[in-house]
Image: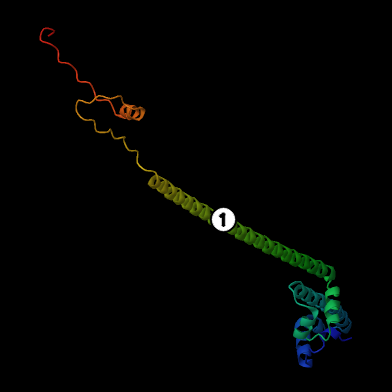
Amino acid sequence: MKDPTTEGYEVSADEIDGMTRNLCAYALGEPHPLDRYLDLTHQQVLFDGIADALRKERGKALAALLIAGATAEEIVERTNLTKALDVKKLVKVAGEAEHVKQALRAAANAERKAAAEAKKRDATAAAEARRSAAAAAAAERKAAAEAKRQEAAAAAAGARREADAATKASKPGKKRAAFPEIPPGTRRVLTADELKALAEVPAQPKKKRRASASAA
């Protein structure tokens, strides 16, 4: 019975005859018919087993393709298989169906985990960018407020200096009271204002008397 999963592959009669003679030369050379029959029957059963083993190995190869990320449809397009179901059948014959299922599940979980981690990294980076922007804005506002405060302080200091200068300019200097002219030989009693003005005159330092010769 022809295997439907090998559809599209053809071999000639000469290829089959040559392979049979190469692999079964000993059995074909057996002179006794009964012994030759027995040997060839054994060879046929052996080759049937080889065919089954090859079918399983083909299924393992397809399983490796599925685990590597290829889909059954993609495998059909690249082989002579006619439908995706043939891919699954060969994988099942090879005993790899559960292995493929676990591998694909692990790959899907890893992909979801990688996507979640990437999303988390993006969120962390965005939050850090927002924090940096907020810190920069706060520093800028603080610098602007400090500059404004210094400007206001400078303006206030200038206003005070101007006010002090205006105050000093408005106050007349303190003048010493002038004594009235008194004619020589005239005696009179000083008024209270004259006594006050006299008291404001700084006292002249007294000169020390020179020591007499006798004291020396």
Residue at image point 35% right, 41% down? 173
- Which residue is most to the top? 214
The answer to whether residue 186 shows anywhere in this view is yes
Q: Quadrant of the N terminus?
A: bottom right
To which quarter of the image does residue 74 belong?
Answer: bottom right
Task: Tell me where residue 75 appears, x and y as whole percent.
Answer: 77, 81
Looking at the picture, tell me which residue is in the foreground, 44 or 63: 63
Q: Quadrant of the C terminus?
A: top left
To which quarter of the image does residue 46 belong?
Answer: bottom right
Q: Is residue 154 left or right of residue 205?
A: right
Task: Tell me where residue 148 appears, x and y as whole percent.
Answer: 52, 55
Looking at the picture, tell me which residue is in the foreground, 137 or 98: 137
Task: Tell me where residue 101 appears, x and y as whole percent.
Answer: 82, 69
Question: Residue tagged by mark 1?
Answer: 139
**Numbered label tally:** 1
Q: Is residue 7 left or right of residue 141?
A: right
Q: Is residue 116 left or right of residue 34?
A: left
Say if 34 sits above or below 67 in the image. Answer: below
To which quarter of the image does residue 116 belong?
Answer: bottom right
Say if 55 sits above or below 188 in the image. Answer: below
Three-letter amino acid code of the residue under disc 1:
Ala
Task: Tell me where residue 160 appears, x and y as whole percent.
Answer: 45, 48
Q: Rate crowding at label 1 as few (under 14), some (14 to 19) or many (20 or more) other CA atoms within 10 Å.
A: few
Looking at the picture, tell me which residue is in the foreground, 32 or 55: 55
The answer to whether residue 46 shows anywhere in this view is no
Looking at the picture, tell me which residue is in the foreground, 20 or 108: 108
Residue at image point 78% right, 65% down? 109
